[in-house]
Image (cartoon, helix red, strand yellow):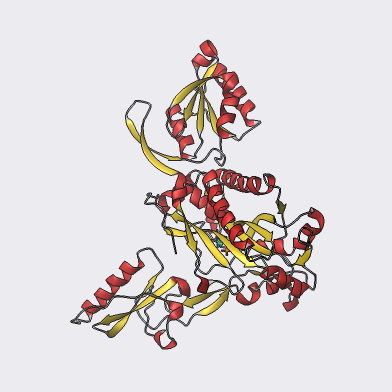
Amino acid sequence: MSENPSNRTVPSMESLVTLCKRRGFIFQSSEIYGGYAGFFDYGPLGSELKRNVKDAWWKALVHERDDVLGLDSSIIMHPQIWKASGHVDGFADPMVDCKESKKRYRADQLFFARVRVDGETIGYVSVEEADDMQAQADEKASEMKRKLGRQGNLDPVVLQEYTEALPEEYALIPSPATGKPGSLMAPRQFNLMFETKVGPLADASSVAYLRPETAQGIFQNYRNVVDTGRVKIPFGIAQIGKAFRNEITPRNFIFRSREFEQMELEYFIDPDDETWPKVYRYWIDWCKNWLVSIGIPADMVGEDVHPAEKLSHYSKGTTDLTFKFPFGTQELWGIACRGNFDLTQHQEHSGKSMEFFDEARKEKYIPHVVEPSLGVDRTILAILTAAYTEDEVPNDKGSPEKRTFLRFAPQIAPYKAAVFPLLKNKPELVETARTLYEQLRRRWNIGWDVSGAIGRRYRRQDEIGTPYGITVDFDTIEKDQAVTIRDRDTTEQVRIPLDQVESWLAERIG
Ligand code: GAP
């Protein structure tokens, strides 16, 4: 069941990627060596944005609540952890190779259909997962019928995942890369964990993994937190950190990369059957509200409830909060009820008890858990998508000019405001502006820009999402000891006394 987000128009991926590069938000990693697929670097503005997003999540969960504690565990952990969690045996995606083009596909993102004319199969078509894949397949099927000169009616083209193909069909399904059958291989399981070696001996016993999720760092520390944190059920442990997955097809910019960050919460609850559904709903709503609090419009967020038959054996329910990305509506945040699977596995594999003595109930049990798990980078892509806006505003000469701006919520904007002396060659203007800038930057990250016409400077700040532009002009020093503050979204300007600028901003940006 999937609730469809709004009909809001979203920017193209290209305009986001170009803006990110041009203004120093996000770069392809190792660019001077031709780039490295699936890895990205956050530039001066991107690193501020990312830090603000992580701080907002940490503040809302760890600082502003009594029942959640923070954690920062190591990236490389005892390899047994990944055995216990099931990742060594099961954290794999089915992969398909095309012998001819050497392209590699994820089998669950590759679709095929039998092309039938009046019930008779005349061939196969294949497409990669995309919003318009049905249209692509229909077109390919019509083309096939035309080329083969077949009369009769084309049956509906029914797409299926490549994982559902029969072994005898592998040789008949064309590769999307070549359009010809015979080059696609049978799907193989491909484990997504990055392996490394720990210690001086490079033998099998030294194999370790870069964590593919931060969650297991929480489970393996659960006992430590219970023993030191004076907690009572329900309580949560939150962690932000890097995770690594050797994705077969990293794509869509920072949406699916090989190195990314997660913000994960494990919320431990009692095992009663009535408890988890309420807690599950509570966290779904909490997550949606948090997204709204950082400026993501509620109507761009949907709920995708996983059907019971697709859940893992231990899972009681999973809902993805989806977001309307430029390439389609996709998972942003997963909220999963994992029962007591993880703690039970760690109890079995480590031999250490994971039981909790519940004072209120006077009973011992292994707590169950609800896990909201969110990618930092996906959140940033959602924020950029939602914030990207184009409109027309008058330029310095009063004629309309196209502008691009990022409508960031002040809480997460890299700069909260920018200060400009009207002219850079008038020391008295620069001095007053500099004094104000230095006052404000003690409290917030503030931009400073002295070059170019004032309209240009506003436009530069608009494009990086700075909510307010503050100009010191001749009236400031000669007449009223006040400055002009311009609002990024409305472009409206107000005159505020110099000594009230800080409190004026504080009211608006916190
Ligand atoms: N502990 C549960 C877990 O890791 P997941 O659905 O595999 O669940 C959770 O990942 C979230 O992490 C996703 O909803 C997404 O936001 C983010 N994520 C997962 N794989 C990612 C990737 N390759 N690149 C960027 N973000 C990713």
Q: In which quarter of the image is residue 416?
A: top right
At x 57%, y 50%, the residue is 42
Q: Quadrant of the N terminus?
A: bottom left
| Image-based side of 331 in relation to 201, left or right | left
Query: What number of labels is visible?
Result: 0
Outermost residue, left side:
151
Res. 431 in view: no
Residue 125 location (% of width, % of height): 34, 77
| Image-based side of 377 in relation to 328, left or right | right
Question: Which of the pair 351/409 is nearer the observer?
Answer: 351
Residue 30 location (% of width, % of height): 56, 56
Q: Quadrant of the C terminus?
A: top right
At x 18%, y 82%, the residue is 151
Question: Which of the pair 465/334 is nearer the observer?
Answer: 334
Residue 466 location (% of width, % of height): 51, 36
Outermost residue, top side:
479
Q: Is residue 463 placed above or below 144 in the rendered structure?
A: above
Q: Is residue 264 placed above or below 187 in the rendered structure?
A: above
Q: Can you tell me which quadrant of the image ligand 1 is in?
A: bottom right
Residue 126 location (% of width, % of height): 36, 75
At x 25%, y 74%, the residue is 143
Q: Is residue 117 placed above or below 468 in the rendered structure?
A: below
| Image-based side of 198 in relation to 290, left or right | right
Q: Is residue 259 placed above or below 496 in the rendered structure?
A: below
Res. 173 in view: yes
